[in-house]
Each structure stands twice: as C-alpha cells, then as structure tokens.
Amino acid sequence: MTELRRMGKAQSRRRSTDAGVKLTTFIPMRIVRHKANWVIVRPGADGHLATSGEPDANLLNALARALYWQQLLDSGRVANIGELAVEEGVDRVRVQKTLKLARLAPELAEDIAAGRIPVGLSFEFFIRRELPDDWIRQREVIAALSK
C-alpha cells in the first residue's frame, strides 16, 4: 500500500515476512507544477523545499510589465486600465490580473528577480489566486508554497 507523508527526514523500515525481508524507504519530496511541467521537489539542507535557483522568465517579464504599466497609470500617460489595454493590445482582464504583481512586497520582487522563489511559484499562481495587499500576508502566502 502506498503511503503519503508530510515533508521530513528520509526513513527506512525493515520488516520480516514469510518470503524474506521487505525493505521500505520513504524519501521526502513533493510533486508540484512548475512552469509547464510537473517537478519533483526535494527538501534542502534545512528541511525546507529547495528553490528553483534561476529566475522564471515568464514571471520576471510579467513583473516588469506590471511595474511599467503601473508607472504609466501613476504618471497619467494613460487615463485608466481600459485605455492601457487598448494601447498595449491586450485584454482588459489580463491587464488587471498582471497589475496585481505591481503590489508585491519589494522583498518578493527582489526574490523573483534573483530566482529565490519556491518551485511552483509562477505567473499563473498570481493570475489564479487573490493576492493580499498586506506585504506580511503576501510573504505568508508565498512561504506556504514551500511547506
């Protein structure tokens, strides 16, 4: 029978049976969606999930676009999101969802640029989920990915 366990240390069990000895090894890991693939994530030396180590190009581009679009709105070069969507040639809903990234905590934006993000954090994560405005809460939501 297959047994799923929470992240922890690797464990081995030895059990004697009529046919001999049965060895069972539990290796802590998680399978998460990263970009377009499913990835096996191993724990790091500290027991937390390892980060991807390299910046996610789609997420980084979306963050840069969101900050640029927010600057256009703040400076008054475009009057509203509808005008921005027409100027950029994208759907208004896409602009709204991308602009959520402009509200990220500065530390999170730096981590995205440096590739210090948990595996599984992608642009789709921000598109599909609500992002709290509170920076402390944002960090908690992102940190929950690595548990």
Image: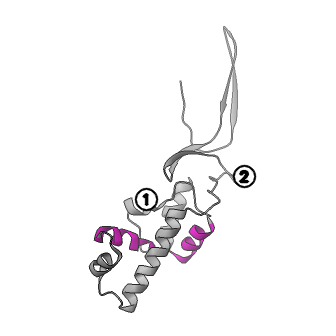
Find numbered disc 1 in the image and state the secondary structure of the residue it sits on.
helix
Q: Amino acid at mark 2?
A: Ala
Decide: few, some or many residues near mark 2? Use Cα within 10 Å; few <14, some 14-19, many ≥20.
few
Q: Calculate the distance from the C-alpha at mark 2 to the C-alpha at mark 1.
A: 28 Å
**Residue at image point 59% right, 70% down:** 113
In this rendered view, identify the residue nearer to me: 58 or 11.
Answer: 58
Residue wearing tag 1:
124
Task: Answer with mark 2 or mark 1, whichever residue precedes in sequence.
Answer: 2
Residue 5 versus residue 89 in the image, above or below? above
- The residue labelled by disc 2 is 45
Taking depth in this image into account, of 50 and 62 the one nearest to the observer is 62
Looking at this rendering, what residue extends furthest in the left direction?
82
Where residue 114 appears, x then y in whole percent? 63, 68
Amino acid marked by disc 1: Glu
Look at the image and tell me whether residue 103 can be seen: no
The structure residue drawn at horizontal position 69% and vertical position 38%, both measured from the top left corner, is 10
Q: Main secondary structure of the magenta part?
A: helix
Residues marked 2 and 1 touching at CB (< 8 Å) = no
Q: Is residue 100 magenta?
A: yes
> How far across and how far down the image is residue 109, in percent?
54, 73
- The magenta stretch spans which residues? 92-114
Identified at 54% across, 61% down, the residue is: 143
Q: State which mark lies toward you, 2 or 1.
A: 1
Q: Quadrant of residue 54?
A: bottom right
